[in-house]
Image (cartoon, rainbow, N blue to C red):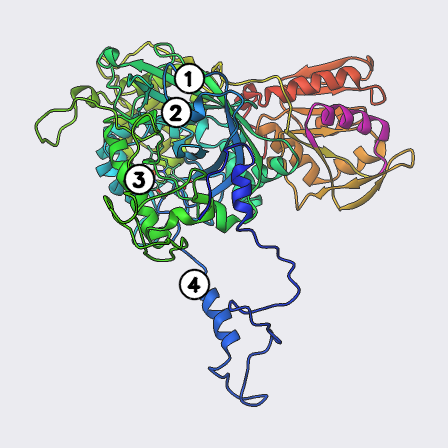
Amino acid sequence: MEKKRAVDEKSKDDQLEMFREDPEREFLTTNQGVRVSNTDISLKAGERGPTLLEDFHFREKITHFDHERIPERIVHARGSGAHGYFQVYEPMTEYTSAKFLQDPNKKTPVFVRFSTVVGFRGSADTVRDIRGFATKFYTEEGNYDLVGNNIPVFFIQDAIKFPDFVHAAKPEQDNQMPQASTAHDTLWDFVVCHPETVHTIMWLMSDRAIPRSYRMMQGFGVNTYRFVNAEGKGRFIKFHWRPLLGIHSLVWDEAQKISGKDPDFHRRDLWEAIEMGNYPEYEFGIQVIEEEDEFRFDFDILDATKIWPEEEVPVKFIGKMTLNRNPDNFFAETEQVAFCVSNVVPGIDFSNDPLLQGRLFSYLDTQLIRLGGPNFHEIPINRPLAPISNNQREGYHRMTINKGKVSYFPNSLGENLPRPASAEEGGYIHYMEKVEGKKIRERSEKFKDFFSQAKLFWNSMSEPEKKHIIIAFHFEVGKVIDPKIRKAVVELFNNVDNELAISIARGVGVSAPEQKEGTQVMKESPNVSQERTEHTVKNTIKTRKIAILIADGYDHTGVRQVMQALNGGGAHTDIISKYRGMLKSSSGEKLEVNQNYLTAASVMYDAVYVPGGKESIDTLKMQGDAIHFINEAFRHCKPLGATGEGVELLKAANLPDIKFAGQKSADKVVSDKGVVTSRNSENTGSFNDSFIAAIAKHRYWDREKKEQVPA
Ligand code: HDE
């Protein structure tokens, strides 16, 4: 039995250490510890004879292999995890008694799992989907799981609809298509049958659903929870995470291409960032509504299809989470981690949000089948740091050897222990909310307003974001085969905005709908927009990936200067050329190529730089792959930089409507819609500053107006 331990940043790691196996044992053995003399040839009756049943090593090896898989999660099957810690900024005593939210010096260990929702375990990372953002806090009072998403609202209002929704969203039941995509008839049939989905569908069609990185997306608890302080005062709470690197997304064409080039794009990005010491950080925020204000809003605060607009209920940031360690073993940790919404600690409680109420049942239940029985809390990644003491016994794969005779309460044979704890002793006391009512299958009236917040969302988008939403509809609904569903989608979204509906209609072969009475809503909430929100930053290039295109005869001084500046700002640079190996500069130095045109593509980078060197540029100009690299990055609105003769390569790519640095004023740096050029390839100082500022902005949406770029 594990003893009580102090909870600090290292304590989960220490606990896991007891279960880690050193792979460098000298001899191969069976699971019984018997040394194996041959693991390559099975025991046979003669060189060409049949295999013998008595070959226990063969049977054990094959049997174990045959049973290696466990069922994947019904939703959120595809995921990636990381360890880290959480620290509160100041004591939250006024709001909650939760101990991990009191002491700013305390580092509470966490394990986070990010995921997509619809795709199978082996599906691509960059599909259009909501992302899961689930956090397990190993607090001194027991495990607290905050199982959130990167979009603050949900498709349905009542958990009883979840199986219907997921059946409609998953591949269709007759042919198991399409994989990891909502662009098909059953999903959109579900949508048109359920107007409550409209608000979340707006978010799903937005750039939120194609994040650049797990490290650059927000997280939301979605459901309404409760904080309860030591005096027993309760308040309604919504949880938020905001990434310190800013909130950034891919563009749709890019996301689709990455699915082929690197289906592990987000998993790799998270893994590599942590390996390199670029630890992802997120601030933890709360929105608070006092109990007496429960009915003050024009939405029901228990409705998970609604946000609490930040203009009405501001977010207070109360702490920070840092992810600083990759798992040792994907299966043992990321696959076997079991998040349960019902895992709460004293000071955190639930609300009557009907989606949350259903979730409280579902998560524990699903682990029973997925992890094979009621003892999954003993799996190392799920073990709390707080000691466990109760009378639960036996079941599949029980690890704990409970000593003594007594496994019941009350008892006289075992000093009546373990006994329930009072509130003062840390016992969990459920919030004493007064509840009364008739047993009915009904929702409150405000739940029936399906469109106001969808309109609020649409009104709050910047122009480029609106355009992306329309393109998303063109793709998703464009793939729907049944014309009556496409028409019904247009009619449904005509309740949100007539211009939106007309734009959708144009792309999906449906006639434009008339303006509906009373659908104009003027309200905005800029924080729902990724471009307008105060929660993003656009002043850092930390951890961005920059591709540098070169060939033999490149200008060495220029490359080194620019690389130094980019790396100095925390960005990662890769040298890309036709072949891997070494390249020779015009002055004889050498540089190693990290990727070739087949192993890399512009979609895997945030920006592209082309240094000078006449011979290098003459070669690149003749390479379609190099020109394509530039065109594609331009089309995806990424910053491009070029110095010296490098400018000629950008010119050769026929980028529409872009001003370049001219031959005559060598020192002048020209920056136009994220394309930064300078004819000076020896002294790149002011070029570096402009290029870094351009990369920090991430994307130049203005360029989307030029659709003639062939990439
Ligand atoms: Fe989940 N959800 N969900 N969900 N969910 C699961 O639990 C469920 C909902 C979320 O990385 C399952 O362990 C119901 C909202 C995440 O392991 C399952 C409803 C939100 C993860 C389940 C919802 C989420 C899950 C499947 C009511 C955002 C992955 C495997 C409609 C707040 C956790 C599992 C991980 C996983 C049920 C809705 C987030 C079946 C019934 C809303 C991040 O129990």
Do the numbered discs 2 and 1 sit on residues whose CB atoms are within 8 Å?
A: yes
What secondary structure do most residues of the magenta stretch adopt? helix
Amino acid found under the numbered disc labelled 4: His
Question: Which quarter is ligand 1 in?
Answer: top left
CA separation, marks 3 and 4? 34 Å
Foreground pick, 409 / 456: 409
Mark nearer the viewer, 3 or 4: 4
Provide the residue designation for mark 1. 92
Amino acid found under the numbered disc labelled 1: Met
Provide the residue designation for mark 4. 67
> Which residue is at 24% across, 46% downward?
411
Give the side of residue 650 with respect to residue 383, left or right. right
Q: Please say whether residue 63 is visible from this viewpoint.
A: yes
- Residue 172 vs 521, above or below: the answer is below
The magenta span reads 552-572
Q: Give the mark, 4 or 2, whose residue is nearer the N terminus.
A: 4
Do the numbered discs 3 and 4 sit on residues whose CB atoms are within 8 Å?
A: no
Counting labels gives 4
In the rendered image, residue 13, in percent from the top left (x then y), is placed at 55, 41
- Residue 340 vs 659, above or below: the answer is below
Q: Give the mark, 3 or 1, whose residue is nearer the N terminus.
A: 1
Foreground pick, 165 / 146: 146
Which numbered circle lies on residue 187?
3
The answer to whether residue 218 is magenta is: no
In the rendered image, residue 26, in percent from the top left (x then y), is placed at 66, 64
- Residue 187 vs 236, above or below: the answer is below
Do the numbered discs 3 and 1 sit on residues whose CB atoms are within 8 Å?
A: no
CA separation, marks 2 and 3? 40 Å
